[in-house]
Amino acid sequence: MTLFLDRDGVINQRIVDDYVRNLLQWQWLPQALEAIVRLSPHFEHIFVVTNQQGVGKGYFSMESVAEIMEFMTKSVAESGGNISDFYCCPHLKSDNCACRKPKIGMALQAKNKFPNIDFSQAIMVGDSFSDMEFGRNAGMKTVFIRTDNVPQVHQLHLVDEMYDSLWDFALRFETV
């Protein structure tokens, strides 16, 4: 099985009406690191897929995004877990880019690098409806993390499961 995770609002604290622009602003959500470690034995691959249009707006660089992702990956590895890779769309929503969620470009990039991925055996965990659409568009199961967003009745068809945090989702898996 394969796990795709959104970043801001699922793994780290989202900055309201702004962006996590650098490592100094990075803050793990409670038990998110532990959740990834707990999930690692259950998934052949764990990927982080994140829209970062702040890059396209010139607020921060791809180097800053890469520094944060390297820190995340190293922290997870040092704690006994694994992140196989990360994918980022730096383009503006108005660019209509194929890699920006809800389009599946980042999922296809992962499959190109790791051909054994079977999207029908994959799970997308996110806190936005573009994350849920991304998962559905790729044929994945979807898990919605409730943050400030509350599903409306017309959006519930996009959501297979709902949890209050990544840790709550991880609790559904037995400890190995």
Image (cartoon, rainbow, N blue to C red):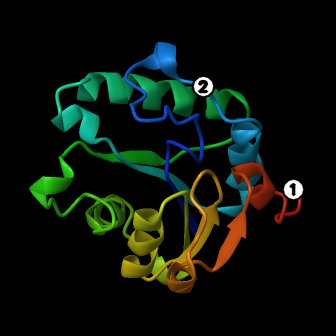
The quadrant the C terminus occupies is: bottom right
Q: Residue at (28%, 69%) from the top-left corner?
A: 103
Residue 117 position, x and y percent, is: 45, 71
**Gap in angstroms between the C-alphas marked 1 and 2:** 27 Å
* Residue occupying the far top of the picture: 24
Q: Residue 35's spot in the image, x, y percent?
A: 74, 46
| 115 displayed left or right of 99 | right
Q: Nearer the viewer, residue 71 or 144?
A: 144
Residue type indicated by callout 2 = Gln
Q: Which residue is mark 1?
A: 176
Residue 126: image quadrant is bottom right
**What residue do we see at 18% from left, 64% from top?**
98
Can you give x and y, in whole percent of width and height, for residue 105 in the image? 26, 64
User: Which quadrant would residue 137 be assigned to in this image?
Assistant: bottom left
The answer to whether 32 appears left or right of 73 in the picture is right
Mark number, residue 113: none
Name which residue lies at 48% across and 35% down.
16
| 125 to 87, vertically: above or below | below
- The answer to whether mark 1 and mark 2 are in CB contact below 8 A is no
Residue 83 location, quadrant: top right
Q: Does residue 6 sit above or below 72 in this rendering?
A: below
Residue under numbered circle 2: 27
Mark 1 crowdedness (10 Å alpha carbons): few <14, some 14-19, many ≥20: few
Disc nearest the viewer among 1 and 2? 2
